[in-house]
Image (cartoon, rainbow, N blue to C red):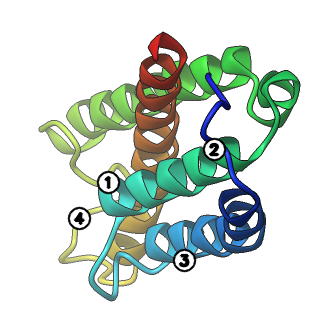
Amino acid sequence: MGNGFKTDILDTVSRKLGPYVLLFGCYMISYGHVSPGGGFQGGVVLASGGILMLLGCREERIEGLFPLSALSLAEAFGFLIFLGIGIAGILFAGFFLASPFGSPIESKSVIPWFIYMLNMVIGIKVGAGVGLICIALLQKS
């Protein structure tokens, strides 16, 4: 990543604003089952917060801040967990991504926890994936 155009303003803003953007992304993922947001939107906000922090740091700190191997593992495990939840729905309820914890007729309190769990998995997967894409694009420039 070329830091030829890095300024003190970019450094200061990214260090101060980045953690708040990451926190807002976590909020969007966590409360997406009861408010606007969810796993996909929160994951993109998480990735944008990470990229904002990367824009302000020095070249040698980038790998230490967000290791590419950790992001790759998070994306792969997010996909596998999502696929496992979907297959569990097939096995226990008869169709993909159905709640394996019981039918909605039996217990209405199960559905919000199931959607919350899906939001968390999707948020991790999307955040890691978009973060990897952005890092790859920034390294090419």
Residue 13 placement: quadrant: bottom right
Residue at 66 percent of width and 75 percent of height: 20
Furthest-left residue in view?
95
Label annotation for residue 27: 3
Q: Determine the CA span between mark 1 and mark 3.
A: 12 Å
Q: Is residue 35 toward the left or the right of residue 5 in the image?
A: left
Q: Which residue is mark 1?
A: 40
Q: Nearer the viewer, residue 95 or 134?
A: 134
Q: Determine the CA span between mark 3 and mark 4.
A: 28 Å
Q: Amino acid at mark 1?
A: Phe
Residue at 72 percent of width and 67 percent of height: 19
Q: Determine the CA span between mark 1 and mark 4.
A: 25 Å
Sooner in the amino-acid sequence: mark 4 or mark 2: 2
Sooner in the amino-acid sequence: mark 1 or mark 2: 1
Q: Amino acid at mark 2?
A: Leu
Residue at 41 percent of width and 25 percent of height: 133
